[in-house]
Amino acid sequence: MTMPQIIFLPHADICPEGAVIDAEPGQTICDAALAHDIEIEHACEKSCACTTCHVIVREGFDSLAESSENEDDMLDKAWGLEPESRLSCQAVVGNVDLVVEIPKYTINHAKENH
């Protein structure tokens, strides 16, 4: 069985060229990205307590495990929320390739710009 791939659409800061990575089924989108040096913000240490790792799953959305009520509550606060929005620290990869867009902005009150 082949590993699912995650195709990241270009993002000015994080991956200007876009990226295609292999992901392990059962891994979260955030962990897969970080393992391949795609620095998705994750201010709450992946505990589903912020929206900085918000992504929009453009293809393959239905292959992801259902979002929890917690995740849905957090997503309501995300900038640029769309029906295919997920928190990448909570979205677990299945067996289907994904096309993921990292939104241009995050709402991150914890981030300090020093």
Image (cartoon, rainbow, N blue to C red):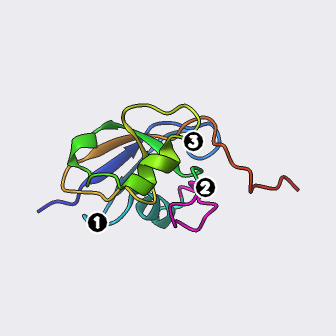
Query: For residue 78, which numbered disc appears in the image?
Result: none
Query: Along the polypeptide, which appears first: circle 3 or circle 1?
Result: 1
Residue 93 placement (x, y as % from top left): 29, 57
Q: Mark 3 touching mark 2, by CB under 8 A?
A: no
Q: Amino acid at mark 2?
A: Glu
The CA span between labels 3 and 2 is 16 Å
Task: Say which residue appears at 61% left-offset and 64% top-offset.
Answer: 44
Work out how far the residue at label 3 is from the one at label 1, CA to CA, in angstroms: 29 Å
Range of residues picked out in magenta: 38-49
Left or right: residue 10 compared with residue 32: right
Residue 6: give x, y in percent of width and height: 34, 49
Callout 3: helix, strand or loop? loop
Q: Residue shown at 44%/56% (left/top)?
A: 70
Quarter occupied by the C terminus: bottom right
Element assignment for label 2 = loop
Q: Which residue is mark 3?
A: 77
The structure residue drawn at horizontal position 59% and vertical position 59%, both measured from the top left corner, is: 42
> In the image, is 77 to the left or to the right of 2?
right
The residue wearing badge 1 is 24
Q: Is residue 101 visible?
A: yes
Residue 41: assigned label = 2
Chief secondary structure of the magenta portion: loop
Q: In the depicted view, which residue is nearer to us: 97 or 83?
A: 83
Which amino acid type is marked by label 1? Answer: Glu
Location of the N terminus by quadrant is bottom left
* Horizontal side, residue 37 vs residue 28: left or right: right
Q: Amino acid at mark 3?
A: Lys
How far apart, in angstroms, are the residues tagged by discs 2 and 1? 20 Å
Foreground disc of the pair 2, 1: 2
Label 1, residues with CA under 10 Å away: few <14, some 14-19, many ≥20: some
Would residue 87 be seen by someone viewing this image from the given angle?
A: no
